[in-house]
Every structure is written in C-alpha cells, then in structure tokens.
Image (cartoon, rainbow, N blue to C red):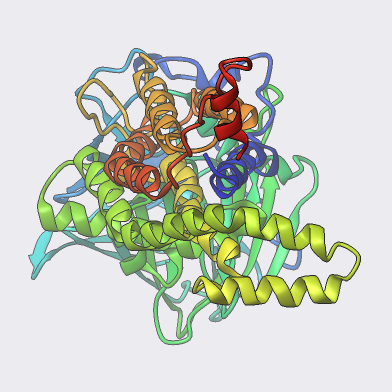
Amino acid sequence: MDRRTLLALLLTAIVIVVTPFLFPAPRRPRPVPADTTRPAARDTTPPPAVAAPAPTPLPAQRPAAAAVVAASAARPETTVVRTDRATFLLLSPGGTPASVTLPEYRSLRPGASRATAVTLVDPTDRLLRLRLAGTRDTVALDTIAFKAGPQRREGGSIVQVLTSVSSSIPVTLTYRFPVDSFVAYVDGSVGTVAGQPPQAWRVLVTLPSRIRSDEADINDDTRHLAVAYRVRNSEVSTVSFRQLDTLATRVDTGAFRWVAIRNKYFVVAAIPEGRDSTFRSVVLRGGPRTGPEATAAFATAMLPTSADRFSLKLYAGPQSWDHLRRAAPDLENVNPYGGWLHGLVQPFATIVMRLLLWLHNTLSVGYGWVLVIFAVAVRILLWPMNQSAMRSSMKLQRIQPEMAELQKKYRNDPEKQRDAMLKLYQAHGMSPFSPILGCLPMLLPMPILYALYFVFQNTIELRGVSFLWLPDLSLRDPYFITPLFMGVSMFILSWIGMRGMPPSPQGKMMSYVMPVMFTALFWNFASGLNLYYAVQNVAALPQQWMLSREKQRSQPAQPVPVAKKAVGGGGKGTRNEGS
C-alpha cells in the first residue's frame, strides 16, 4: 500500500471520526420521557395541547359570548375526508383538521401492529388551529360550531365547505384536498358581526404542539423535533424544541414564505397562498417539560387578511423530497443536512438524493438494489481516474531512487534541487503535481460518502425499507453482517494493493488497523451506508487486482547473486577469479 493510498484512507477515517463530533446527537436523557414510551395503542399521555400565546401587540383573546354559547350547546361533530394519500378529520367546534392519517406509512413504534398507519398528531392536539385577531378582540375558531356541507369532487380534488352556525361572527371555510397529494387548501372568509362596525382581521395560525412519533427509536425521533421557517429570499431557519424557553416567548418578524413543525421524517407546514401573501410574524414558545427532553412547543404565525379573506396551503405528510419541492419553495430543506456545514453538505446530498430517486423510478427496483447499482456505478465512473492515479504511483516508485539521489546531492542547495527534480519529472512525463493529483480519485468518493451519512439518517424514502436480511436500511444491521463484511472487503482490498510493493512494516500495520477501525466506526451506522461502502469495496477489487499485476510486471528484475568460489580451491582457479 503506497503512501497516497494511506493518506486517502487516513483522510477518510478522519472525516468519519470527526463527523460525530461536529454533529453530535443530543445528549440521551437518562430517564425516558413519559409521553414517548408507550405503545401506540396505549399512548394516552401526549403533551398538553395548550393554544399558543398571541403576539404581544395583539389584544387579548376574548371569544364572543354568543359564539361560546353556540359552541357549548353544539355537539362535537367530525367530518372525514379521504384521499389517495391521507385521511383528514375535520372537527367542529373549530372547523379545522384535528388529525391526519397516512395509510402509506406504517407505524414502527414498539408494540404497534404492522397494520397501524402513521398518525401525525396526538388525540388531544390539533393539526391546525385558527384564531381571528381584530382591532377589538381575538376570537378562537375552536369556540365556534361549524356545519359541514356535502362533499363534492372537482377535477382531481375533494371539496368540503364548513359554515359557522353562530350569527355573531359568520365564518366560512372552504377546503380543497387534491386526491394525490398530502396538501390541503383552506380558503376562509369572515363576515360582518351583526350590530358592530367592521373590523380589520388578522388570522393567527397555530401548528400542532409536536409531530407524534411512530418510529422504532422514539428518543432519537424526539430529539429531531424542531420548528422551521423560511423568510423571503433567505435560507431555511431551524429552531429546535430544546432551544425554546417554557417561560419566555420568542417573536420573529419578517415576510415568511412558510412555517413548519417537524420531527425526523414527517412535517406539518402552513404556507400562505395568494400573490405576495406571507406571514408577517412567528411566535414561538417551549411547551411544558415532563423530563429532560423537550417534547412540545407552540408556533403561531400571523397572516393579514385581504377584504376579510385569507388563503392557506397546509402540508401534512412525509419529508419526501418530491412532495415537499412541489408544495412550497425550499420546503425540501425543512430538515437541512449538515448542521452548520449545511451549505457544503446540502449540494452533495441533493445530488445523491436525486440520483437515488431517479434510479428507483427508472429501474423500478427497491432501494436496496438502488444502493448496490449506485455504488457500482460510482466505482465504474472513477475507474479511469483511479487507473491514471495508480500508474502515476508506479512511476513515482520507479524514479524514487533517482529522487533520493538528487535530494542527497543538492541537500545544501534547495534551488538546484528543485530544478533537478523538475527535469526528472519532465523526463518521465510527469509534473510536480502528480503526487497530489494522484490522490484525487481516492478522495472524490468522500463527499458522496459524507452526504450519504446524512441522507441515510434523515431520508424518509429509506424509512422501513427492507433488503435481504436487513429490516430497515435507515437503521443499523441487527446482525452486524454489513459492517463486518465492509471491514473484510476493505482488508482484502488493502492486501491486494500491497502485492508487489517493497516490504513495509508501517503499510502492513495499516492494512490491519484501518479495516478494524472502520468496522468499529460503522458498527452502529445505518445498514444502507454499510451496504453502499461494502459494495464499493467489492466493485474496486477487479481494478485493484489488475493494477497489482501490472505493478508486479513493471518491477525491475532482481539481479541473481553470484556465489563466490571457495578460497583455496587451486591456484589456477584463484588466478582466473582475480584476473
């Protein structure tokens, strides 16, 4: 194994070792949060679903008396809207979605049935809450009873109209649910209150206090809880639940394209509709904590009305790259990769994600085979560069004695040494940059490996996807076969690369240490990442074998030592030897 190969392996190891320190998982709490440990069937302790506080400049919430009477007298009613992607439950009083179920995604919670679909919010929470803030008071729609009209089909959407039954504040909410989407459009209109002058209304949109966890590792999913938003012409901002104070309110102002609350794989986002329509402020506050981990937060966005009308788009579904990209600009970055290195990691992660999706859709194969094909394709694309790099390495080995001689001859004259080395490189068709350029083919796969580290940790397309003996490509191998196979394939690759090279104790030691170190590092990584890296090693074996054979053939023949004749074997023989 030459020095450049060792350098490439060491740099790769540094990246893998440093990554957990640069992006450490939040401290695992000693006690498990009380509201995230129960199975789905018995999950009756969600965080309190308290309405988020209104922004400080707004008047205090004071529901109209007639609306309160109407709501208390009305029996709670639910309206179910089923699309091809989701099932929404509209609740009255309130007139807003209480929950959404995603039949395409199965709950992975411990103890959950395989037939249990993912539900995004807890039973006592709401997918969306609306309040009307006027110049004199603030009215929560949760206090107003609504009557649902008949559902109708318009094109590729299901339309549902809800009308308030209170004459004190007439409100009409028109929902449009595209059948092949996770999106719901909300068009609202506010009428004039009888006996009162018109008010200029603003709509306060409150998201759920959290996204309910349906993952196998509930603690890890809880640590991903965050609020995200995008201000016009700016990058996505993320505020973790852990960063929010339970006693202090945070108010951010600006022109917000969208506001979302997410966990590891799912998201609920509110997006203003209409030309130049944006949220004007976002109010954030941490929810009550029952343990060391933050499990709830409140996020409320303020949207001005136009002629007492407003329009919203609600996305409630998976963090699927295709669906998020179609829902709103830059919403696909709601869960940014790479933390503070997002600007460096995200481009590579986006390229990798697009290639994986393209292979999956084009070849119509599972993501396990997509990873195998992708790993082999990357190795084939790098084949010419690796070939050139290894041949440059062999040239460097051949001229190494001449280089050592020149360094010794001109050790006291750096300028002459540099000129002599340059002439030596030119005589063999090389340049002083050949050693550096030779390392590039080995370093090029590293950004892909780095991006895959984040893609496998957060990409819902790989959630729950099985392959061969692997139950979930996004989780570690339960039998640890893939990290062991990756380490063995790495050792074989190193062993073949050392064939035909001069004996080197350092190289021999590295051929044992590096595979062991990488196996330990990848032990608990996503099994898909181990699969990709192992296939890369296997795909590199033919080229490494051919280059090793070529290296052996290019080695100069070793002179055969001539045995000396024994002394005293006769005067004539001695004279012939000395003549």
Residue at position x 39%, y 50% in the image: 554
Q: Position of residue 365 (x, y in %)?
A: 13, 45
User: Which residue is at the front of the view, 29 or 398?
Assistant: 398
Q: Position of residue 161 (x, y in %)?
A: 24, 62
Residue at position x 66%, y 75% in the image: 422
User: Which residue is at the front of the view, 574 or 380?
Assistant: 574
Residue at position x 61%, y 46% in the image: 7
Q: Residue furthest right?
A: 412
Residue at position x 32%, y 54% in the image: 378
User: Does 340 appear above or below 120?
Assistant: below
Q: Position of residue 508 (x, y in %)?
A: 56, 27
Quadrant location, the C terminus: top right
Res. 157 image quadrant: bottom left
Left-right relation of 239 to 519: right
User: Does 44 appear above or below 211?
Assistant: above
User: Which residue is at the front of the view, 442 or 427?
Assistant: 427
User: Does 271 appear above or below 295?
Assistant: below
Residue 403 visible in the shown view:
yes
Q: Position of residue 417 (x, y in %)?
A: 78, 70
Left-right relation of 281 to 184: right
Q: Disc count in the image?
A: 0
Residue 447 visible in the shown view:
no
Left-right relation of 64 to 105: right
User: Which residue is at the front of the view, 372 or 338?
Assistant: 372
Left-right relation of 573 to 460: right
Res. 503 image quadrant: top right
